[in-house]
Image (cartoon, coloured by chain):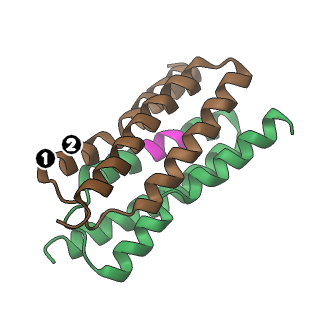
Chain colours: A green, B brown
Amino acid sequence: MSVDVLGYIAGAITALTFLPQVIKTWREKSARDISLLMFLIAAANEILWIIYGALLDNWVIILTNAVVLAMSSTMIFLKLRYNKK
Amino acid sequence: MSVDVLGYIAGAITALTFLPQVIKTWREKSARDISLLMFLIAAANEILWIIYGALLDNWVIILTNAVVLAMSSTMIFLKLRYNKK
Protein backbone atom coordinates (compact mmCIF):
# COMPACT_ATOMS: atom_id res chain seq x y z
CA MET A 1 0.00 0.00 0.00
CA SER A 2 1.46 3.34 -0.98
CA VAL A 3 1.71 6.28 1.38
CA ASP A 4 -0.79 8.19 -0.81
CA VAL A 5 -3.43 5.49 -0.38
CA LEU A 6 -3.03 5.69 3.41
CA GLY A 7 -3.54 9.46 3.16
CA TYR A 8 -6.74 9.04 1.11
CA ILE A 9 -8.11 6.49 3.60
CA ALA A 10 -7.29 8.75 6.56
CA GLY A 11 -8.88 11.70 4.72
CA ALA A 12 -12.06 9.75 3.97
CA ILE A 13 -12.39 8.72 7.63
CA THR A 14 -11.77 12.32 8.72
CA ALA A 15 -14.63 13.45 6.47
CA LEU A 16 -17.01 11.08 8.27
CA THR A 17 -15.83 11.64 11.87
CA PHE A 18 -18.66 14.05 12.81
CA LEU A 19 -21.41 11.94 11.20
CA PRO A 20 -22.21 9.77 14.29
CA GLN A 21 -22.59 12.95 16.38
CA VAL A 22 -24.88 14.56 13.79
CA ILE A 23 -27.05 11.41 13.66
CA LYS A 24 -27.17 11.06 17.47
CA THR A 25 -28.10 14.71 18.05
CA TRP A 26 -30.65 14.67 15.20
CA ARG A 27 -32.37 11.57 16.60
CA GLU A 28 -32.31 12.48 20.28
CA LYS A 29 -33.03 16.20 19.80
CA SER A 30 -30.77 16.96 22.75
CA ALA A 31 -27.51 18.93 22.58
CA ARG A 32 -27.01 20.23 26.10
CA ASP A 33 -23.65 18.46 26.55
CA ILE A 34 -22.29 19.55 23.15
CA SER A 35 -19.69 22.34 23.03
CA LEU A 36 -20.85 25.07 20.61
CA LEU A 37 -17.34 26.55 20.65
CA MET A 38 -15.84 23.26 19.44
CA PHE A 39 -17.99 23.25 16.31
CA LEU A 40 -17.53 27.00 15.69
CA ILE A 41 -13.74 26.48 15.80
CA ALA A 42 -14.08 23.41 13.56
CA ALA A 43 -16.16 25.31 10.98
CA ALA A 44 -13.79 28.30 10.87
CA ASN A 45 -10.87 25.91 10.61
CA GLU A 46 -12.44 23.98 7.73
CA ILE A 47 -12.75 27.25 5.78
CA LEU A 48 -9.00 27.80 6.30
CA TRP A 49 -8.28 24.24 5.13
CA ILE A 50 -10.45 24.71 2.02
CA ILE A 51 -8.53 27.91 1.14
CA TYR A 52 -5.26 26.04 1.76
CA GLY A 53 -6.43 23.16 -0.48
CA ALA A 54 -7.53 25.61 -3.18
CA LEU A 55 -4.15 27.39 -3.14
CA LEU A 56 -2.42 24.01 -3.53
CA ASP A 57 -5.04 22.83 -6.07
CA ASN A 58 -5.42 19.73 -3.87
CA TRP A 59 -8.94 18.33 -4.27
CA VAL A 60 -8.56 15.73 -1.54
CA ILE A 61 -8.04 18.52 1.02
CA ILE A 62 -10.84 20.64 -0.50
CA LEU A 63 -13.46 17.84 -0.60
CA THR A 64 -12.58 16.31 2.79
CA ASN A 65 -12.90 19.68 4.49
CA ALA A 66 -16.04 20.66 2.58
CA VAL A 67 -17.75 17.56 4.01
CA VAL A 68 -16.53 18.33 7.56
CA LEU A 69 -17.65 21.97 7.15
CA ALA A 70 -21.15 20.77 6.20
CA MET A 71 -21.27 18.49 9.27
CA SER A 72 -19.91 21.19 11.61
CA SER A 73 -22.48 23.67 10.31
CA THR A 74 -25.23 21.08 10.86
CA MET A 75 -24.01 20.57 14.46
CA ILE A 76 -24.04 24.35 15.08
CA PHE A 77 -27.66 24.46 13.82
CA LEU A 78 -28.66 21.44 15.95
CA LYS A 79 -26.91 22.83 19.04
CA LEU A 80 -28.73 26.15 18.74
CA ARG A 81 -32.04 24.40 18.10
CA TYR A 82 -31.88 21.70 20.79
CA ASN A 83 -29.65 23.31 23.42
CA LYS A 84 -32.33 23.69 26.08
CA LYS A 85 -33.92 20.27 25.88
CA MET B 1 1.70 34.99 3.77
CA SER B 2 2.97 31.81 2.22
CA VAL B 3 0.77 28.79 1.66
CA ASP B 4 2.88 26.85 4.17
CA VAL B 5 2.11 29.37 6.94
CA LEU B 6 -1.62 28.99 6.23
CA GLY B 7 -1.19 25.20 6.58
CA TYR B 8 0.61 25.58 9.93
CA ILE B 9 -2.11 27.91 11.23
CA ALA B 10 -4.88 25.54 10.09
CA GLY B 11 -2.99 22.61 11.66
CA ALA B 12 -2.58 24.42 14.98
CA ILE B 13 -6.31 25.24 15.10
CA THR B 14 -7.15 21.61 14.21
CA ALA B 15 -5.04 20.46 17.16
CA LEU B 16 -7.13 22.59 19.53
CA THR B 17 -10.60 21.92 18.06
CA PHE B 18 -11.60 19.31 20.67
CA LEU B 19 -10.30 21.33 23.63
CA PRO B 20 -13.55 23.29 24.34
CA GLN B 21 -15.49 20.00 24.39
CA VAL B 22 -12.97 18.39 26.77
CA ILE B 23 -13.16 21.41 29.12
CA LYS B 24 -16.98 21.55 29.00
CA THR B 25 -17.41 17.82 29.68
CA TRP B 26 -14.75 17.86 32.41
CA ARG B 27 -16.43 20.77 34.21
CA GLU B 28 -20.05 19.69 33.83
CA LYS B 29 -19.40 15.97 34.37
CA SER B 30 -22.15 15.18 31.89
CA ALA B 31 -21.65 13.42 28.55
CA ARG B 32 -25.06 11.97 27.74
CA ASP B 33 -25.39 13.88 24.45
CA ILE B 34 -21.85 13.06 23.27
CA SER B 35 -21.39 10.43 20.55
CA LEU B 36 -18.90 7.79 21.74
CA LEU B 37 -18.62 6.51 18.15
CA MET B 38 -17.48 9.92 16.92
CA PHE B 39 -14.51 9.98 19.28
CA LEU B 40 -13.66 6.30 18.68
CA ILE B 41 -13.53 7.03 14.91
CA ALA B 42 -11.50 10.19 15.57
CA ALA B 43 -8.97 8.32 17.74
CA ALA B 44 -8.52 5.47 15.23
CA ASN B 45 -8.19 8.04 12.45
CA GLU B 46 -5.54 10.02 14.34
CA ILE B 47 -3.46 6.84 14.62
CA LEU B 48 -3.66 6.48 10.80
CA TRP B 49 -2.64 10.13 10.37
CA ILE B 50 0.33 9.70 12.74
CA ILE B 51 1.51 6.66 10.74
CA TYR B 52 1.03 8.69 7.53
CA GLY B 53 3.01 11.61 9.00
CA ALA B 54 5.78 9.24 10.18
CA LEU B 55 6.07 7.66 6.73
CA LEU B 56 6.40 11.14 5.19
CA ASP B 57 8.67 12.31 8.05
CA ASN B 58 6.26 15.27 8.43
CA TRP B 59 6.35 16.49 12.03
CA VAL B 60 3.49 18.96 11.59
CA ILE B 61 1.15 16.07 10.73
CA ILE B 62 2.58 13.89 13.53
CA LEU B 63 2.34 16.53 16.28
CA THR B 64 -1.07 17.91 15.24
CA ASN B 65 -2.60 14.46 15.26
CA ALA B 66 -0.86 13.40 18.47
CA VAL B 67 -2.58 16.32 20.23
CA VAL B 68 -5.97 15.44 18.72
CA LEU B 69 -5.45 11.77 19.67
CA ALA B 70 -4.80 12.81 23.27
CA MET B 71 -8.00 14.93 23.30
CA SER B 72 -10.08 12.19 21.64
CA SER B 73 -8.82 9.63 24.16
CA THR B 74 -9.71 12.02 26.98
CA MET B 75 -13.24 12.41 25.55
CA ILE B 76 -13.65 8.60 25.34
CA PHE B 77 -12.63 8.37 29.01
CA LEU B 78 -14.99 11.19 30.03
CA LYS B 79 -17.87 9.74 28.00
CA LEU B 80 -17.49 6.33 29.66
CA ARG B 81 -17.19 7.93 33.07
CA TYR B 82 -20.01 10.49 32.88
CA ASN B 83 -22.39 8.86 30.39
CA LYS B 84 -25.19 8.21 32.84
CA LYS B 85 -25.27 11.52 34.62
Q: Amino acid at mark 2?
A: Ile
Q: Quadrant of the N terminus of chain A?
A: top right
Segment tinted magenta in the rendering: A45-50
- Mark 1 packing: few (<14 Cα in 10 Å), some, or many (20+)? few
- Mark 2 packing: few (<14 Cα in 10 Å), some, or many (20+)? few
Which SS does the magenta portion mostly show? helix
- Percent position of residue B51, x then y: 67, 31
Secondary structure beneath dot 1 equals helix
Q: Amino acid at mark 1?
A: Arg
Left or right: B27 in relation to A7: left
Against B8, residue A41 (above or below) is: below
Comparing A14 with B29, the one in front is B29
Q: Quadrant of the C terminus of chain A?
A: bottom left
What residue is rendered at 26% in x and 54% in y? B81
Output the chain of dot 2.
B
Residue A29: quadrant of the picture: bottom left
Left or right: B57 in relation to A1: left
Instruction: Check if residue A28 falls in the magenta segment.
Output: no
Please give the label number shown on residue B27.
1
Please give the label number shown on residue B38.
none
Left or right: A21 in relation to A63: left
> Can marks 2 and 1 be said to lie on one chain?
yes
Against B76, residue A45 (above or below) is: above
- Percent position of residue B55, x then y: 73, 24
Cα–Cα gap, marks 2 and 1:
6 Å
Left or right: A8 in relation to A29: right
Contact, mark 2 vs mark 1 (Cβ under 8 Å): yes
Comparing B34 with A26, the one in front is B34
The residue that label 2 is drawn on is B23
